[in-house]
Image (cartoon, helix red, strand yellow):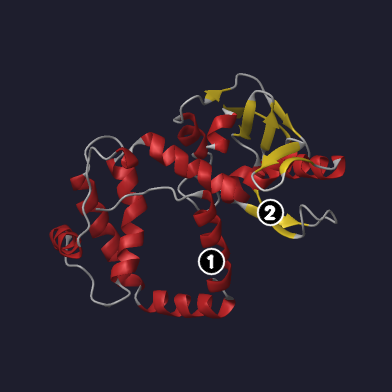
Amino acid sequence: MLQRVPPERSEWEAVISELRHICTPQNGARVIRRTTSILGALLSDIEHLREAIAAMLPGRTAGRLADTLAPALAGARLLTTTVPLADATAAAAWLEEAGWSFDPDDEELSPDAEGRQCLEHLLSHSVPWRDNHQDVGTGRITVRRLLALAQGEERRADTGLVVHDKEVVEAARNELGRLGVRRSDMGIEVSTSSTSIRREVYGGTRWANGAHKGRLLALQGAERLDHTVRFPNGGSTRAVRLPAALIEA
């Protein structure tokens, strides 16, 4: 059964780290050459698989999920062949033969599940980070970590309560603001329209062009703010507010 299950924090960040080693210019060039050579078959398979998957999933989310899953499955299939699927019937037969199935009642296919994936994508987004403080380090840092620093203090299992230097806290808040994210006493506020959130964080994903707003609002406790929010180093825009518990879960 195909399930879209968000991994644990440590697993997700480990995957991102591994991707940085895999996604090299050399490997990218190889992928481009192969994709170009089978582009016709890839586009054909995507369309046939999209139709087959949509037929298996009822409800309003069927088309969206099919659009999301079909390219990944088409790419997986064409790793071992260059012959395209003849039609949607052939695509359905391939899905069955490969052992892919879709349970319409699976809660992992619900709008809430996609909202959690959308949020996880944001939290795992990483940016360059330079700091001379030993407890923070230099290199890249995730939004999840920036949110922890922006609190000013955090409780760790190994060292207990840690109070961060004011310069670190301010730098974290400014970087979050640049991305269109702010931590407040009420929770976490995410811009619905800032350039950074639309292009840098969600650009090229199924949540691009502001689609993240609807997905985040599907999360329990999320609310649409009826006023603009000022993001440090990022201007003022409308925002979605998320309970802090969603970030800490």
Please indicate, yes or no, whether residue 153 appears anywhere in the rendered image: yes
Q: Secondary structure at mark 1?
A: helix
Q: Position of residue 197 (x, y in %)?
A: 62, 43
What is the number of the mark on residue 222?
Answer: none
Q: Secondary structure at mark 2?
A: strand
- The residue pinned by badge 1 equals 19
Give me the residue at 85% from left, 56% from top: 132
Please indicate, yes or no, whether residue 208 appears anywhere in the rendered image: no
Report whether 76 appears left or right of 239: left
- Determine which quarter of the picture holds residue 130: bottom right
Q: Nearer the viewer, residue 99 or 61?
A: 99
Give me the residue at 53% from left, 66% from top: 19
Q: Earlier in the sequence, mark 1 or mark 2?
A: 1
Residue reaching furthest to the top: 226
Q: Position of residue 122 (x, y in %)?
A: 57, 45
Q: Residues under labels 1 and 2: Cα distance?
A: 15 Å
- Amino acid type assigned to the residue bearing label 2 in the image: Ile
> How many residues crowd mark 2 within 10 Å: few (<14), some (14–19), many (20+)?
some
Give me the residue at 62% from left, 34% from top: 191
Q: Nearer the viewer, residue 55 or 242?
A: 242
- Determine which quarter of the picture holds residue 86: bottom left
130 to 57, vertically: above or below: below
Q: Position of residue 168 (x, y in %)?
A: 82, 45
> How many residues crowd mark 1 within 10 Å: few (<14), some (14–19), many (20+)?
few
- The residue pinned by badge 2 equals 141
Report whether 91 appears left or right of 170: left
